[in-house]
Amino acid sequence: AFISQEVRLMAERVQWEPAWDAKHSRWYYQDRFSGESSWRAPQGCTLKLPTEPPKISQTAKEALPAGWEEAFDVTHNQEYYFNRATKERTWTRPRLKPSSKPASSTRSRDTRDLSPGGRGCSKNPVREGASGSNFQVPPSMLDSPCGNPNASFAAFEVPRGVSVDDAVIGDSRRGLLDVPTSRRVAGGPRSPARTGASGRGALTWDSVDFSRRLQDAKDQMARSRSSDMSGVKKVLAEVANHNYEIRFQFGRVPRTTMVPYQRCTSAQVPTRGKEAQVTVSEMSTADAIQYFALRRRNVCALNFANGVTPGGGYKNGAVAQEEDLCRRFPQLYSSLFEAKKEGMYPFGPPTFVSAGNPGKYSDVLYTPELKLTRASDAHGFALVSSEQVTASFVAAAAPNTNNNEEYDLALMFNTLEAVFKVPRMMRETDTLVCGAWGCGAFGCSPEDVSLLFAQAIQKFGHLYDEIHFAILKTPSTSNANVFRETLSRKGIKFTDIDVAA
């Protein structure tokens, strides 16, 4: 039978784990990524289920309040509690109030007898809210850990009657170690790591509580006169966790593609018929994207990429340009992560071998049509609706001087040629948002980088209506002024954009 491309890709992406169904007291197979599950071993999967049930304490416990149920997380070897109605999850056992009635031990949602002789023995439970009918998957997900890349999705039996809250996740977490696991939604209860498996988690985010705790962490750092960012990073990492939970709430994750520099050298890109307007601001890249996109521009922005690790230190709450973009655009990291799995990483200076073999020094990655769905850190990364905009990204890795990567100005200029050409090669784009590429944590010279950009504008500026430099002002740098001085010295007219004016 004909299998659609989307269904085939979903079948190839499965990553099976053991899970315990507390209701029916038996193990089953579960793909935490898609939510699919099966009593029997799926086709091509060699995973063996445990023969013994998980060790759950048999100590007599106080009855739970109405609506609360108990489950067991094998990964953390700990019981947790959930409420279906309110969607709350917590490690701490809820206390029964005097007026509360104990939760019923019988679940009304599925009363079928699934014992071997029961009427429902041929039926399988279903993972609520994560069935193949509503799951969207990026087209780049082509690996098959279970060993059968040609397996038909129709061959996977979908259990029925088991909600995501019934499952106890096993220890086999292949393919999920490099993605954020949810431990806490800002301002909400601490929750088990398996939430968000479907990518369609709740679009709820307490930005006020998050802002308060982020400011508390910054204040604590200031009081201790320390450069230790661990407290701040811990809070910021919550955004990565929540983004992972909601990554499919905004549609299919766009696919990132690798564009070799050699393809750019031969590309014939039509001009706009005039030189670009050049502007400078002290906005963040994400804020600049929003500024132009709200003015009906087709925007592509330069992502100051880590050429080894997708998103850099995003999952750990690091503070840099790429990490901020991943926080503001929830699907960016997911797309880059899939690009790594397709072999697109490493790229850029980390691949340099010699002058005669520069590797993928000047290759770039292109990610189209991502939605900005969060406000800035100043607003607690609140989820936005009325001001959602769409932009594309060209990811280029600058040399990391801290790692002694090759600092070659000619190769860096080649990279900027790709940065200028690729957005126009891939789709209609009229505005390119750039910045002080590599001049932060990577330690590149702003004088060198601004000069390279000036030369790129002189050679490729006619490809755009506007080229904007978004250079966030910080207490320790004056990169924006360096760029202004270089542009002036090279005779490139520019205008400052003051969004506060």
Image (spheres, rainbow, N blue to C red):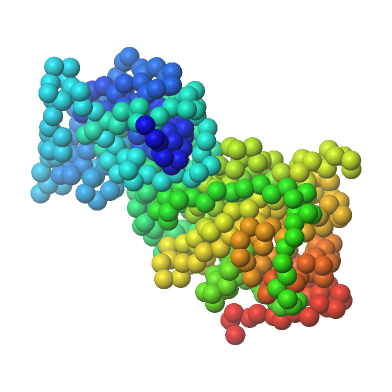
Q: Residue, x 30% and y 44% (percent of image)?
A: 129
Where, by quadrant of the figure, is residue 295 drawn?
A: bottom right
Q: Residue, x 36% and y 57% (percent of image)?
A: 204
Check the image and name the residue furthest to the right: 355
Left or right of 403 on screen, residue 329 = left
Q: Where is the N terminus found, in terms of image quarters?
A: top left
Left or right of 375 on screen, residue 125 = left
Q: How far from the left and from the top, in percent, is residue 497?
A: 65, 80
Q: How far from the left and from the top, in percent, is residue 142?
A: 52, 35
Q: Is residue 491 above or below residue 207?
A: below
Q: Nearer the viewer, residue 113 or 275?
A: 275
Q: Residue, x 23% and y 45% (percent of image)?
A: 84
Q: How far from the left and from the top, in percent, is residue 154?
A: 35, 31
- Total marks placed: 0
Q: Nearer the viewer, residue 206 or 226?
A: 206
Q: Is residue 104 above or below residue 275?
A: above
Can residue 364 be seen here? The reply is: yes
Q: Residue, x 85% and y 39% (percent of image)?
A: 357
Q: Is residue 174 above or below residue 382?
A: above
Q: How far from the left and from the top, in percent, is residue 53?
A: 29, 19
Can residue 474 be seen here? The reply is: no
Q: Where is the C terminus found, in terms of image quarters?
A: bottom right
Check the image and name the residue furthest to the bottom: 501
Left or right of 134 on screen, residue 251 = right
Check the image and name the residue furthest to the top: 51
